[in-house]
Amino acid sequence: MTEKPSLPQSERFLLPVSPVPKLRAFQPYYRERVLCRIATAFELASTDELPPYFLVEFILPAKIGLRKDLENRFGPAPDQEAEKCRRLAMRGFFDSFQYHQAVIQCEDRICLDLVPSGKVTADERAYSMRFLSHLKRRQLGRE
C-alpha cells in the first residue's frame, strides 16, 4: 500500500483554488417535475421545447426579468389563472436550494439562450444567503 505524499501545513494554504465553482443540479425526479410544470404552464408539448437555459444539467443564476423574456417568447398568459400557474411553476425552480447556491457561487447571470447578461451583485448574494439560512432553519424545525 502506498501512501499519498502530504504537504507540510504551511504549503497547504498555497494551493490554487479552482476558479469554476462546483455547481449543483436538481435530483432527476425533482428536475423532471419542475420542468414539466414550467412546460405545462407555458402550454408547451414537452420539456424539449423549453429554452436552453432550463435544459442544461446544472443550475445557473438567471437574468433579471427572465419571466418577461419567457412571455415574449411564448406569449402572454391568457387569463389570471394561467398567470398564477406560471408564477407557481417558476417559483419551484427559482426558490430552490440549488438555485440560491448558484447565485452565491457564480459571478454572471445567464439569459434564456445561455449568454451572460449581467453580474450577480453583493445584495443578491446576501439575499440568497438569508434565503438558504431560512430554508435550513425550516428543515431543522421539521426534524
Image: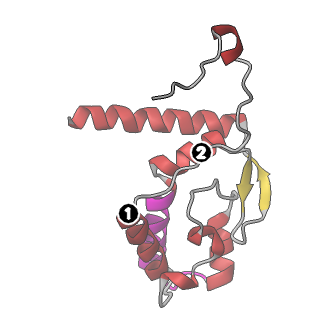
* In contact (CB < 8 Å): disc 1 and disc 2: no
- Left or right? Give the position of 4 relative to 114: left
Q: Which residue is mark 1?
A: 30
Give the image location of residue 96, x and y in percent.
Answer: 46, 51
- Left or right? Give the position of 33 relative to 87: left
In the image shown, does 102 or 7 lie closer to the viewer? 7
| Colour scheme in use | secondary structure
- Left or right? Give the position of 133 relative to 57: left
In the image shown, does 26 or 118 lie closer to the viewer? 26
Q: Of helix, strand and loop, which one carries label 2?
A: loop
* Residue drawn at the location 41% of the way across and 34% of the way down: 134
Image quadrant containing the N terminus: top left
* Residue drawn at the location 48% of the way across and 38% of the way down: 131
Q: Amino acid at mark 2?
A: Lys
Image quadrant containing the C terminus: top left
Give the image location of residue 48, x and y in percent.
Answer: 54, 83
Label 2 Cα neighbours within 10 Å, binned few <14 / some 14-19 / many ≥20: few
Residue situated furthest left in the rendering: 143
Q: Which residue is mark 2?
A: 22
In the image shown, does 28 or 84 lie closer to the viewer? 28
Q: Main secondary structure of the magenta part?
A: helix
Q: Of helix, strand and loop, which one carries label 1?
A: helix
85 magenta-colored: yes
Q: Quadrant of residue 117?
A: bottom right
* Residue drawn at the location 64% of the way across and 41% of the way down: 105
| Residue 86 can be seen in this image | yes
What residue span does the magenta drawing correspond to?
76-93
Give the image location of residue 16, x and y in percent.
Answer: 74, 29
